[in-house]
């Protein structure tokens, strides 16, 4: 059975996939790898390749999906399947790049909590009864990693390359999934990825924003289960 490597998003850890591992890890070989402190996507992806089995599937959310695409670009013969969740195959837009400078400066000055509270958390989630608990978990993951990780990950995201040709060349079974209300990586990016990957299934999760693994865990886990069964 093909092992699957899960890559969390920016300033997140394996808790991002807690429901999926609880429900699926007894049936499927699964591992989560951390995002290191490197400042380029290539260096981060090389770390993933050192952690990963010889042949594997990849599941990544947000920055984790961007890293997954870089892993695929570097080692296409090792990747047998791909799940891209709430992510973006394009290089970072100029206006987003420009906005990162103030966030990096604030984090370096010891104001990481404010950056997350005011600049990032309001964009993460759809309205829902568990929003507060999910936001608290996001803050705990971010503060646990700390400002150095935030700065490095921000720079890697800022300087990333376009991966549309990487996806166009991939023909393994793939899942493209996003929350309907994701404003950071909106639905149109996922329609693009679905069009680029020949053997892909598109899943739009209602009543979810940028983190459907936590906002709508049952629906997201069911979609991942169907994808894992197809590997």
Image (cartoon, rainbow, N blue to C red):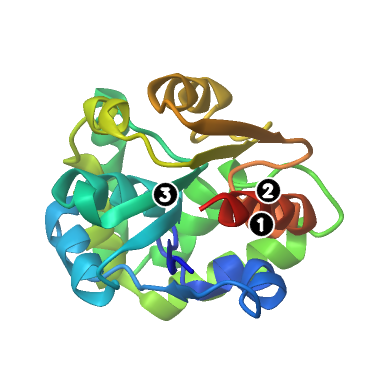
Of residues 104 and 8, the one drawn nearer to the viewer in this rendering: 8
Callouts 1 and 2 close, C-beta under 8 Å: yes
Q: Which residue is mark 2?
A: 223
Work out how far the residue at label 1 is from the one at label 2, CA to CA, in angstroms: 5 Å
Q: Residues within 10 Å of mark 2 (few under 14, many from 20)?
A: some
Work out how far the residue at label 2 is from the one at label 3, CA to CA, in angstroms: 14 Å
In the image: residue 132, left or right of residue 149: right
Q: Which residue is mark 1?
A: 225
Q: Is residue 103 visible?
A: no
Q: Which badge, 3 or 1, is on the more N-terminal residue? A: 3
Q: Which residue is mark 3?
A: 81
Say if 126 sits above or below 116 in the image: above
How far across and down, in percent of the image, does residue 154 sit? 27, 52
Q: Residue at x 50, y 28 (%)?
A: 190
Q: Residue at x 66, y 57 (%)?
A: 225
Say if 114 sits above or below 220 in the image: below
Of residues 74 and 134, the one drawn nearer to the viewer in this rendering: 74
Say if 110 sits above or below 214 in the image: below
């Amino acid at each position: 059975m093909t092992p699957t490597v899960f890559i969390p998003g920016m300033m997140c850890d394996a808790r991002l996939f807690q429901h999926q591992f609880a429900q699926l890890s007894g049936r499927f070989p699964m591992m989560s790898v951390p995002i290191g402190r490197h400042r380029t996507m290539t260096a981060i992806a090389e770390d993933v390749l050192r952690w990963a089995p010889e042949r594997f599937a990849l599941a990544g959310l947000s920055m984790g999906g961007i890293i997954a695409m870089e892993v695929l670009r570097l080692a296409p013969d090792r990747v047998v399947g791909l799940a891209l969740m709430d992510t973006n195959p394009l290089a970072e837009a100029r206006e987003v790049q420009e906005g990162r400078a103030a966030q990096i400066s604030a984090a370096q000055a010891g104001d990481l909590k404010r950056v997350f509270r005011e600049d990032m958390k309001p964009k993460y989630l759809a309205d829902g009864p568990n929003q507060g608990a999910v936001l608290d978990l996001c803050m705990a993951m971010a503060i646990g990693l700390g400002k150095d990780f935030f700065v490095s990950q921000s720079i890697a995201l800022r300087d990333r390359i376009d991966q549309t040709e990487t996806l166009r060349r991939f023909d393994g079974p793939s899942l493209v999934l996003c929350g309907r209300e994701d404003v950071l990586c909106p639905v149109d990016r996922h329609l693009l990825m679905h069009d680029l990957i020949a053997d892909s299934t598109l899943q739009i999760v209602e009543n979810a924003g940028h983190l459907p693994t936590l906002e709508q865990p049952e629906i997201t886990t069911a979609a991942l289960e169907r994808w894992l069964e197809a590997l």
